[in-house]
Image (cartoon, rainbow, N blue to C red):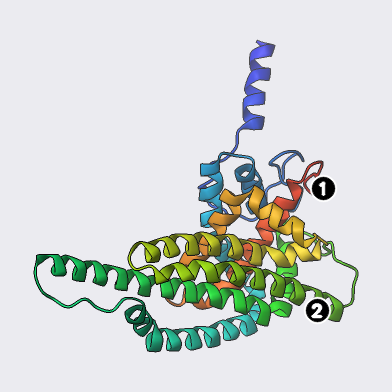
Amino acid sequence: MANQESDKQVDVDVRMPPIGEALGEAALVSPAGEGSSAPGEHALLKRLRIARDGSPRAQAIAGGLLPLHALRLLLANLKLVPLLIIPVLINMALFAVSIYFLVQYAGQGVEWLWAKPAAGGALEQVVLVLWYVVYVLAILVSVALSYVIVLMLGGILASPFHDILSEATEKILLGTEEVQGTGLSFLVETLRSLGSNIVIVLIYFSLLIPVLMLNLIPGLGTIAASALGMMLSAYFVGLEYCDPLLTRRNTPVKRKFGLIREHIWFAGAFGLGTNFLLLVPFLNFLCMPIAVMGGTAMGIVLLEGEEGAEPPQ
């Protein structure tokens, strides 16, 4: 009888809540260890630790939903709203510029790469239908990529404000008034963070340009460019918005790229989920600060996953 009661107790201790469970709860207090929360920590970190160590499917689901859970975290902590004002204004200005150029030149660019076929016989009609399919796809991809570019450039322009928001988010997630910092002055930290963002954006564009060149190949080239462009943007958006936390923890640039690569299902799905959030009216203006909050949570969990690392006690 004693053994049966002991077995039941073990079952209770190791049972984990499902990934899809609401992540906007306050905090859980449980014994420290793998997938557990330290006293005062937000429950979101526990869920992300479980996902990090789970299957690729669990990682992809948790990463893709993280922007929505970051939004819930924001709604539960409205004291962060003043920290969003300048990033949101920067986001709106970049969106306006992006949409202007998209409306003016995207369609012309497609017609320049592949002139609209003339209507004629059956074969010409098939080619014309294919042209319209490629045209619509190219416009949609242009919209998505322009939004991603807004995210990347916004990360540079709003870098100092993202650092402040990331640090405030980290305090809420860890349930503490003090978080690990670089020990440097505010100006030096700002310049350091700005430099890191510029490096990430330059590498992103250096890889994006060859991908966009595939559009010079009509039809299949556009489809290939679309797929590769979305995968590339998912990786770099995930990296860009984990960066404030990673930089504050003195993570070398090479290691930042390695962390995202090693957890590509997790961080890549977070980047892809952030990209989709850009397509939701009104929420897209909040996308940058929401991404910073989600990236802060992910950055904490990714660094804890390093060999020999333990969750904060």
Question: Dot 2: within a 10 Å radius of its alpha carbon, few (fewer than 14), some, or many (20 or more) residues?
Answer: few
Residue 6 locus on image (x, y percent): 68, 19
SS at mark 1 in the image: loop
Asked if residue 30 is positioned above or below residue 64 in the image, the reply reads above
Please give the name of the residue rendered at 83% of the width and 75% of the height, measured from the top-left corner: 189
Q: Quadrant of residue 142?
A: bottom left
Horizontal side of residue 120 vs 175, given as left or right: left
Q: Disc 2 marks which residue?
A: 191
Horizontal side of residue 106 vs 64, given as left or right: left
Q: Disc 1 marks which residue?
A: 313
- Contact between labelled residues 2 and 1, with CB atoms less than 8 Å apart: no
Q: CA distance from mark 1 to mark 2?
A: 31 Å
Q: Earlier in the sequence, mark 1 or mark 2?
A: 2
Asked if residue 68 is positioned above or below residue 209 in the image, the reply reads above
Question: Dot 1: within a 10 Å radius of its alpha carbon, few (fewer than 14), some, or many (20 or more) residues?
Answer: few
Horizontal side of residue 195 vs 19, given as left or right: right
Residue 275 locus on image (x, y percent): 50, 66
**Disc number for residue 198:** none
Asked if residue 263 is positioned above or below residue 131 in the image, the reply reads above
Please give the name of the residue rendered at 80% of the width and 49% of the height, measured from the top-left corner: 312
Q: Outermost residue toward the top?
A: 1
Q: Can I make out residue 43 in this image? A: no
Between 25 and 69, the one nearer to me in the picture: 69
Residue 41 locus on image (x, y percent): 72, 53
Please give the name of the residue rendered at 52% of the width and 78% of the height, measured from the top-left corner: 285
Q: Quadrant of residue 180?
A: bottom right
Q: Outermost residue toward the left?
A: 121
